[in-house]
Image (cartoon, rainbow, N blue to C red):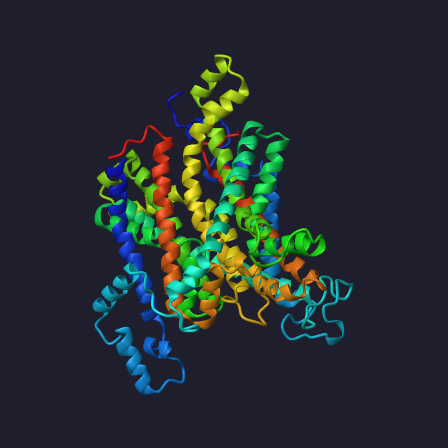
Amino acid sequence: MATLPAAVQGVVSGERVRTPWSEFWRKFKRQKIALVAGVFVVLLVVVAIAAPWIVPYDAENYFDYDKLNAPPSLAHWFGVDALGRDIMSRILMGARISLAAGFLSVAIGAVVGTLLGLVAGYREGWWDRVIMRICDVLFAFPGILLAIAIVAILGGGMTNVIAAVAIFSVPTFARLVRGNTLALKHLTYIEAARSLGANARTIIFRHIFPGTISAVVVYFSLRIGTSIITAASLSFLGMGAQPPTPEWGAMLDAARSDMLTAPHEAIFPALAIFLTVLAFNLLGDGLRDALDPRIERR
Amino acid sequence: MTAYIAKRLLGLLPTLVLVGFLVFMLVHLLPGDPARLAAGQDATPETVELVRKDLGLDKPLPQQFLRFVNGVLHWDFGRSISTKRPVATEIGDRFMPTFWLTVWSMLWSVLFGMTIGIMSAVWRNRWPDRVGMTLAVSGISFPAFALGMVLMQIFAVDLNWLPTVGNDTWRHYILPSITLGAAVAAIMARFTRSSFVDILGEDFIRTARAKGLDERRVVIKHALRNALIPVVTMMGLQFGFLLGGSIVVEKVFNWPGLGRLLVDAVDMRDYPVIQALVLLFSLEFILINLIVDVLYGLINPTIRYR
């Protein structure tokens, strides 16, 4: 009896079987902060999707010329900006832009990076050398510099920012997945699959890929925070979203000249970025602790 | 040791050539004619042809690349389109402010971040840990430009303790270095903590405690040296983050450095300057990572140089 696998033992002894999913949920729900962050992220996504229908005013084309730079009030909860636009409406619409930018860029980076990492780790040899060399080159450009260089070639605007941030997420995922693949491919179950005649594609996608998912998911969440900040930074530098787009970084840049008289114009976009990124980071930390088998009630 | 450094330098060559090639291609990937870009919008076709000849843009690409590499090796990056001054001079004027800003940021953030990380690991799950890690996760979530604006508002405008913009005295360095280093301090704190937590669970730490050493000695003498190894690697990676971050922070504080120069160059579509700066930033980053690798070996005697 003692030699039976845990799942089988559970069935034999009448205990509930723990699927990987229920195991993950059991660990994840213990992390109250990550749970709250997760709920916040879900709310944010709902708000972002519903934004056009729930904003009190038109974010780009409503101007109240009698209330320029007016502080928060009942009519304008977050106040009015230098052009007479309602800041709350702009923040809510901005959530769409920032979440889309963060999610899309990381998603593209994760898919491309994961594929490259799987191929490099599984094939080794030339494939590995070429792919990892490309990653080294991408890594040789510090921080947002690569994004700035790409924007300098492609021109400003949010689409190009997303492309730039996606390119700069690729090597992170490629390295991560390559490392996992190298570790997994020598395990016996992969050898078993190969001896049964499975081809490379089946082995990579059916047997190796599932083993890398948990690491990719954790990085995905942590990376979204970084990407939202990078995209907002590019807009702050004037290379991303162009006026009158209600992008949070661009709003902060516009607020700089009125910091003395109207600090609320800077406070709300800054808070919006901070809380959003914080939520993704806390969620990512929670996912990591729940998915990492080494961390058990430390 | 020397052989190891030489080997690492040789290993860098392909990366260097590829980076150089990408930066060289930057101008050729642009929509439009680089000669017309350099000559200016309202230049006559004759002038454009002259500029094309002068810049060697009429030669085949490989020859142009060699010419570019030769220029770089002689510290010649061409002339800025907007100011007409040599790019090398422009960069020379702006280099030191950025250099000192990055150095001060790195120093305080590493010291502060590691202290918080060590304290959090030693008092794990108690209040110093909770406070430290709350600070750290906030630090990585607060964008530098927002932090800079907040700090400037509070300490320079409202309290009038520190100057707002410029880089004339040491007091000018305080706010920009704090802004630039905050995220790095936060990352260092998180990383040091997890590295320390791993080390504190090792057998040799238990041995040190069992033989009756006091806790301070265990932490400083036995744990610190071992926990530092991954932390030093992390430091190298963070340097790149600082170089990138300086671009944003320099805009907030109107700092007369390379980051500000790059932002202005992108605005003005001043491609020779963009090219030179992208190359310079990545060279610096590659070099620093090499230094970190060597340092890594110095503090970790288990690594043999081959």
Q: Quadrant of residue A251?
A: bottom right
Q: In which quarter of the image is residue A97?
A: bottom right
Which residue is at a point 59% across and 33% down the rendered structure image? B129
Q: In this view, does A164 lie above or below B201?
A: below
Q: In this view, does B105 lie above or below A168?
A: above
**Residue A140 in sight:** no
Give the number of marks: 0
The location of residue A45, given as percent across then percent down, is: 58, 57
Which residue is at a point 64% across and 32% down the rendered structure image? B127
Query: B260 and A7: which one is in front?
Result: B260
Query: A149 and A57: which one is in front?
Result: A149
The location of residue A256, given as percent across then percent down, is: 63, 63
The location of residue B257, given as percent across then percent down, is: 48, 59
The location of residue A145, given as percent across then percent down, is: 43, 58
Which residue is at a point 76% across and 75% down the rendered structure image? A66
Query: A270 and A174: which one is in front?
Result: A270
In the orientation shown, which residue stands out farthest toward the right? A74
**Residue B43 in sight:** yes
Q: Quadrant of the N terminus of chain A?
A: top left
In the orientation shown, which residue stands out farthest toward the top? B211
Left or right of A261, for residue B48: left
Which residue is at a point 49% across and 27% down the rendered structure image? A14
Query: A179 and A45: which one is in front?
Result: A179
